[in-house]
Image: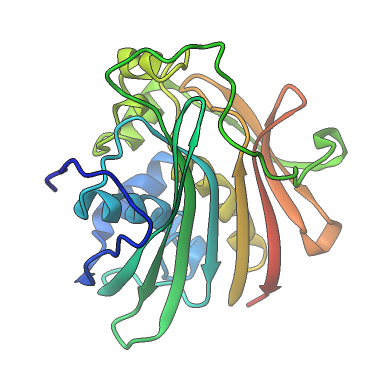
Amino acid sequence: MTEQTVEPYVGLAYRERSYTPDPEEERRLLAICGTDPAVFGGGLDPATFITHAIEEQVRNGISSSGGVNMVQWLIVDDLPRFGEAVTVTGGVTAISQAPRGRITESEAQYRGADGRHCLNSGRVSLKTDPSKYADPKLRGAGKRPDPVIADPAALQVVEEVQLTPEIVCGYSANTANPIHNNMDAANRAGYRAPIIGGAHGVRYLTRAIWSHFAPRHVHMDIRFRRPIHWDDAFEVRIAGGDSWTAIGLTRDGKVLVEMAIRDLVPG
């Protein structure tokens, strides 16, 4: 995949494209996360389409280098199957500026081989200048949405995860964004060490949801609150009792990633 250099603009539309997600690459990523593919009932982990949507931006000329997810949403109706061709459309819907860089909002839609709607993957991302070292005193990344999880300690722990550089480098082996596996690139972006990609962290959340509910439909609103470095440990916590209104990744009493779970229809 050749990355071009263009400035994104509101209204930039992706070229419609059909392709088949690589089933072996998907199995490799699931294995790195310790996830049994059977959890998703023969479908692809919806978190993989966070990465696919970023790659679609790159295919349409928008550089991913130095980009960090801030907000993500996934609206799932029918997961694409392993080995199934999908058609993707979408584009850039908003652009703004913040002290730490440019903020871009975009969304991609995926349809299955039979034309059915499978899912939407939307994101708001912050792009720093990869040629410069970010000022660590600059905290501004635009208006932050209201928190989903107010008190992490009140939530139930369902899993504990310990990352290692080997896990994160393995997961990001094919990334076009070096902040996930290169110390200097991470430092230039203002991080003490490489950080995991948004999709990597969300995979721990989708695994828990599909293991418990195997949903036929769900709307997931995700907020990336703090970076997760390649040597961090964290907990997966849930809220809402049996209904699971929210789920998140937490560390030392702080929320790293949080997700509001909406309109869930169990399988």
Q: Compare residues 223 and 47 and report the one nearer the observer.
A: 223
Residue at (29, 27) in percent of width and height:
178
Q: Is residue 81 left or right of residue 153?
A: left
Does residue 56 sit above or below 163 in this rendering? below
Q: Looking at the image, can residue 84 be seen?
A: no
Does residue 188 sit above or below 247 in this rendering? above
Q: Position of residue 94 (x, y in %)?
A: 46, 54
Quadrant of the rendering where the C terminus is positioned: bottom right
Q: Is residue 245 left or right of residue 140?
A: right
Residue at (60, 75) in percent of width and height:
217
Does residue 144 sit above or below 122 in this rendering? above
Q: Position of residue 144 (x, y in %)?
A: 66, 39
Residue at (27, 38) in percent of width and height:
175
Which of the 4 image quarters holds residue 190?
Answer: top left
Q: How many marks?
A: 0
Q: Compare residues 165 and 38 and report the one nearer the observer.
A: 165
